[in-house]
Image: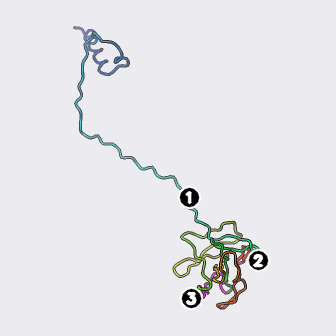
Amino acid sequence: MTRQGLLALIAPVLLAACGTPGAASSGPSSSPTATVAATPSFSPTPTAAPTPTPAAPTAPPRAAPSLFVASNMALGAVLVNAQRRTLYYFVPERGGRIVCTGACTNAWPPLFATSTAPTAGAALPGQLSVVARAGSEQVTYNHWPLYTFAGDAGPDQTNGQGVFGFGGKWFVATPSLQP
């Protein structure tokens, strides 16, 4: 047999084994066909472990505002905490120096910062910050430590305005409070 004759005989077998398009849909063939039986292989093939996709950078969670500006009939714009309790400053604490300690903090509870930096519910012309105090951080506005007053029975009261106690005067904190 010549090479061409042998090739003509083997070509249809090879094409059928390779799965030529349309071979499955054609009718019975008169040319010889070969059946290839594959033996299953149980050896695992290594696959690449999925690489974790780094998460897109996200903005830090926004904390609830620590203080807000409220309108008071007698005093105008005043600073209040999240519970709308009026905030006060103590004149002897100019510049952020803590003077109100002990029994003073029972009458004038400090406004402590939450786990994040203090924020305002509205734009304030001054600077919000914190000062270290007894294992926590007290909120300051323009370097004045801020307090509520135990004599205010509820929100929007200003009973501490102008009170003299614990060695100095107390005033309602306003957005225009100067350092």
x, y percent for residue 50: 39, 46
Secondary structure type for disc 1? loop
Which of pointers 2 and 3 indicates the residue nearer the eye?
2
Give whichever of discs 3 and 1 has the lower sequence position: 1
Which of pointers 3 and 1 indicates the residue nearer the eye?
3
Spatial CA distance of label 2 from label 3 is 29 Å
Query: What range of the chain is rendered magenta?
Result: 92-105
Name the amino acid, label 1.
Ala
Given residues 178 and 85, the one toward you in this image is: 85
Name the amino acid, label 3.
Gly
x, y percent for residue 6: 25, 11
Residue 135 is left or right of residue 149, and the answer is left
Task: Indicate the quadrant containing the N terminus: top left, top right, bottom left or bottom right.
Answer: top left
* Residue for badge 1: 59
* Residue for badge 3: 102
Determine whether label 2 and label 1 are within 8 Å by CB. no
* Residue for badge 2: 75
Which of pointers 2 and 1 indicates the residue nearer the eye?
2
- Circle 3 packing at 10 Å, graded few (<14), some (14-19), many (20+), is few
Give whichever of discs 2 and 3 has the lower sequence position: 2
Q: Is residue 84 visible?
A: yes
- Circle 1 packing at 10 Å, graded few (<14), some (14-19), many (20+), is few
Q: Is residue 179 visible?
A: no
Please check the rendered image and state whether residue 104 is part of the magenta-colored stretch, yes or no. Answer: yes
Given residues 169 and 15, the one toward you in this image is: 169
